[in-house]
Image: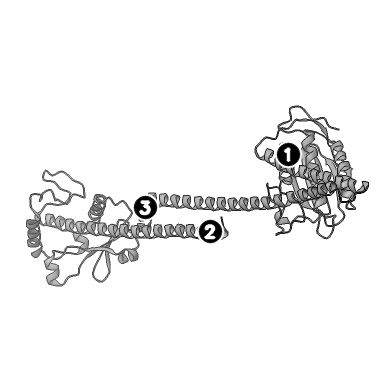
């Protein structure tokens, strides 16, 4: 997948995700506004009903039926306004009756006309009828904003009650008050926790929407991560194909030229020249074998086909053998390989063949990735639980940003189109796999003794006992 396509895909999905968030935010805002309007309408309706019931209660008092007294003399709750007594009257007859009673009445002080307990009971009942459960405070005010009655708590905040948008006029049918220019009374209702109450009503929807948006964001992130990993893997595979083509063409061409020279009867050949050509064929054939072996070992490791045969292994003997076989390669370039066996305990349980191959691999890399005469120092030390082996060189070094990546399969440090060092990025991945199968670990550090900031140290830790160890290791 091209970089431009990936960028456009990320932008498209990102815009879609932002669009979903924006639409969700607009929907929540609209829903809150609608719920707020419905709440205000319900509060207004409740206050209108309270005002009407107060007028009816006053009418009952004018008729001589006191709130709190029944026809049989028994007490009733304070919320009973005597409406049952006039239940047979329709609304039109009742309104006419109220206007008739109040037209001949003398205005009385508001604190005598309203019982705070009765008013509180009426408000609570009307709110419950509309399924509104909340804390509230109320007050009765005149036209000038003076508070005459406050409740249900005497210490309610009068300023907030005065500024509440929820209010209704009391005693709207009071003709005496209107004729005599008396004050107009207003019932104010304060709901202090209205915003939180509205949010609580939307909490299930908001929680579900948030979880869905979070799920979309997580899936988006995972998809982007997968796309980048696939793109990186594709680039690595393309680089592998290019390197493999380059690696195979060189020995094949060399072998072909040497064979043509040997078979050409017209070309004079001395014994030394024949020996040199045969040596070239042998060396290039060996290189081809190593290339194929590296690819096969990587395939075996990747498919889980690595089968280890654990025996007691003397790592000092293994390292001495590796140094002997790799010394010639370093000496050809004017270098050397040194072994300093400082470990008191050097026996581990492992597969000798695989352990030998990983140190051959590390030494081969140390020699290849060196622009001067290669110097390789191999040191060992031990503690109570493990053997630590360090392979340090004076090569070109590994940037800190690449040190964690070099053990990835098929990964090679980017060098552009320069292929002066042969390889597929398989060796260190294979080394790490073998070490981990032995219960150990491997890490890389810069070599401080190499100077000029170059050189690398590979530190391998092999435990004396691990999960695949069926018998205690022989130490010594």
Colouring: one colour
Query: Of tags 1 and 3, which is closer to the observer?
Result: 1
Which residue is at the front of the view, 470 or 197?
470
Give x and y (percent) for residue 247: 74, 50
- Labels 3 & 2 near each other (Cβ < 8 A): no
Query: Of tags 3 and 2, which is closer to the observer?
Result: 2
Judge the density around disc 2: few (<14), some (14-19), many (≥20) Cα neighbours within 10 Å: few
Residue lying furthest right: 271
Q: Quadrant of the N terminus?
A: bottom right
Check disc 3 and report its element: helix, strand or loop.
Answer: helix
Instruction: Please name the residue shown 59% across and 51% down the image.
Output: 229
Which label belongs to residue 434?
1
Q: CA distance from mark 2 to mark 1?
A: 39 Å
User: 60 above or below 107?
Assistant: above
Q: CA distance from mark 3 to mark 2?
A: 40 Å
Q: Which residue is mark 3?
A: 202
Judge the density around disc 1: few (<14), some (14-19), many (≥20) Cα neighbours within 10 Å: many
Which residue is at the front of the view, 158 or 61?
158
- Labels 2 & 1 near each other (Cβ < 8 A): no
Q: Which residue is mark 2?
A: 5
The mark that comes first in sequence, 2 or 1, is 2
Q: CA distance from mark 1 to mark 3?
A: 57 Å
The mark that comes first in sequence, 1 or 3, is 3
């Amino acid at each position: 997948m091209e970089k431009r396509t990936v960028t456009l895909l990320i932008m498209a999905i990102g815009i879609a995700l932002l669009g979903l968030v924006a639409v969700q935010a607009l929907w929540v805002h609209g829903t809150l506004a609608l719920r707020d309007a419905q709440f205000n309408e319900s509060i207004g309706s409740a206050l209108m009903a309270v005002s009407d019931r107060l007028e009816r209660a006053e009418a009952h008092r004018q008729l001589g039926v006191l709130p709190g007294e029944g026809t049989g003399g028994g007490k009733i709750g304070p919320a009973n306004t005597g409406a049952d007594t006039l239940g047979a009257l329709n609304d039109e007859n009742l309104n006419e009756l109220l206007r008739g009673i109040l037209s001949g009445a003398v205005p009385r002080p508001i604190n005598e006309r309203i019982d705070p307990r009765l008013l509180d009971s009426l408000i609570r009942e009307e709110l419950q009828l509309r399924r509104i459960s909340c804390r509230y405070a109320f007050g009765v005010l005149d036209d000038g904003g003076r508070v005459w009655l406050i409740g249900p708590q005497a210490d309610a905040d009068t300023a907030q009650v005065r500024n509440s948008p929820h209010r209704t006029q009391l005693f709207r049918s009071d003709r005496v008050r209107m004729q005599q220019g008396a004050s107009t009374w207003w019932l104010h209702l304060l709901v202090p926790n209205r915003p939180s109450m509205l949010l609580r009503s939307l909490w299930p929807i908001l929680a579900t929407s948030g979880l869905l948006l979070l799920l979309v964001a997580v899936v988006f992130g995972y998809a982007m991560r997968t796309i980048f990993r696939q793109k990186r893997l594709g680039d690595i595979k393309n680089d592998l194909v290019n390197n493999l083509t380059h690696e195979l063409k060189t020995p094949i061409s060399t072998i072909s030229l040497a064979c043509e020279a040997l078979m050409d009867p017209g070309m004079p050949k001395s014994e030394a020249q024949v020996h040199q050509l045969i040596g070239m064929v042998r060396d290039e054939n060996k290189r081809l074998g190593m290339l194929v072996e590296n690819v096969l070992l990587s395939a075996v490791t990747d498919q889980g086909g690595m089968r280890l045969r654990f025996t007691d292994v003397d790592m000092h003997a293994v390292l001495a053998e590796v140094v002997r076989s790799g010394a010639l390669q370093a000496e050809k370039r004017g270098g050397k390989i040194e072994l300093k066996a400082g470990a008191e305990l050097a026996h581990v349980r492992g597969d000798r063949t695989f352990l030998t191959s990983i140190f051959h691999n590390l030494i081969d890399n140390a020699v290849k990735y060196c622009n001067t005469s290669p110097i390789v120092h191999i040191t060992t030390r031990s503690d109570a639980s493990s053997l630590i082996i360090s392979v340090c060189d004076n090569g070109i070094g590994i940037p800190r940003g690449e040190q964690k990546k070099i053990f990835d399969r098929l990964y090679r440090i980017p060098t552009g189109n320069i292929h002066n060092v042969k390889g597929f990025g398989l060796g260190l991945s294979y080394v790490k796999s073998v070490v981990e199968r032995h219960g150990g670990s491997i890490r890389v550090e810069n070599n401080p003794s190499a100077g000029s900031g170059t050189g690398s140290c590979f530190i391998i830790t092999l435990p004396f006992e691990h999960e695949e160890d069926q018998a205690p290791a022989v130490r010594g």
